[in-house]
Structures are given as structure tokens and as C-alpha cells.
Amino acid sequence: MDLWLSVIDYAVVKKVSISTLRRRIKSQSLETKIDNGRYLIRIPQSEVDTFEKNMQFEPLQNRSEDRKSDTNPALSASIQDLIQELKSAYSQILSEKETMITQLKSEVEILKHINLFLEQQIMNSPQPSLPTKDQYLDPDLI
């Protein structure tokens, strides 16, 4: 019986990097299947036997089958629905935030132009003259 391992488990057994495995999966040089959204890679029984003899470990077990027996399909579907709902809500919030950021950037640019205009007005307007000493002492101004 062949053994199906996750990408991480296969990488450990074969002593290759995960990125190398992903490239091999993409090029279809490994026999794979997708189980619950995760790639599983096939190891022929002959390789499993050789590995067990060389390493002198207990037989490897197919973890995906163990997980399947513990997982209720209805619960799994419910969890997937919740994950999809969370992803959708997260995407919507991100979209709203991006829209707000764009609006705020626009408002900042408008305020910069208004500030520049007002500074130019101040620079071009005549400066009020300060009252002289006589004007302060003039009784008619009091």
C-alpha cells in the first residue's frame, strides 16, 4: 500500500526543501492529490519499506487518513464556510479602508492647496502698521 504524505512530511523524509517540492508539484514530476485543500504526495510502498529498514523506525502511518477518521464531514464543511465568510468580511473591510485612505489622501491634497493659497494671501496683503507713541497718547482715540 502506497503512503500519502503532506508536503512538510515529505520534505522531512526526502530531505528536500518545501519550495523544491512546490516546484516539482507544479511541474507535475511528483504524483500528488489534493485532500481538504492540502497537497499529498505519494510514496510507493517499496520506498517506505526501504526507509523503515534503513532508519529502523516503526512503520510510517498515513496522517491524512488518521485526520479523516477524526473529522466530521459536516463539521469540516461548516468550518470551511466560516473561513470563507471571514475571508469575505476581511476583504470587504480592506476594500473600505482602501477607499477611506484614498479619500483622506485627496482631502490632504486639497488642504495643502488651501494652506498654500492662504499663505500667499498673507504674504501679499499689506502689513498693518503699528500705532505710534502719539497715537497711543491721543485723547481723541480713547
Image: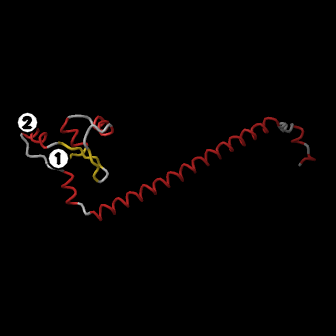
Q: Which amino acid lies under the numbered mark 2 shown in the image of this protein? A: Asn
Q: Is residue 126 above or below residue 64?
A: above
- Mark 1 against mark 2, which lies toward the viewer? 1
Which numbered dot is residue 3? Answer: 1
Taking the spot 21% from the left edge, 41% from the top edge, the residue there is 10
Q: Residues within 10 Å of mark 1 (few under 14, many from 20)?
A: some
Question: On residue 54, which mark appears?
Answer: 2
Q: Is residue 49 left or right of residue 83?
A: left
Q: Position of residue 41 (x, y in %)?
A: 23, 44
x and y, in percent, of residue 90 in the image: 45, 54
Relative to 72, say whether 53 is above or below: above
Find residue 36 and name its label.
none
Foreground: 106 or 139? Answer: 106
Colour scheme in use: secondary structure
At horizontal 18% and vertical 39% (from top left) the residue drawn is 13
The secondary structure type at the circle numbered 2 is helix
Where is residue 18? Give x, y as percent: 28, 38
Q: Residues within 10 Å of mark 2 (few under 14, many from 20)?
A: few
Determine whether, in the image, residue 27 is placed left or right of residue 105: left
Residue 86, placed above or below residue 98 = below
Q: Is residue 118 left or right of residue 64?
A: right
In the image, what residue type sits under mark 1? Leu
Farthest right residue? 140
Nearer to the camera, 31 or 10: 31
Label 1 to label 2: alpha-carbon separation = 17 Å
Of the pair 100 and 63, the residue shown nearer to us: 63
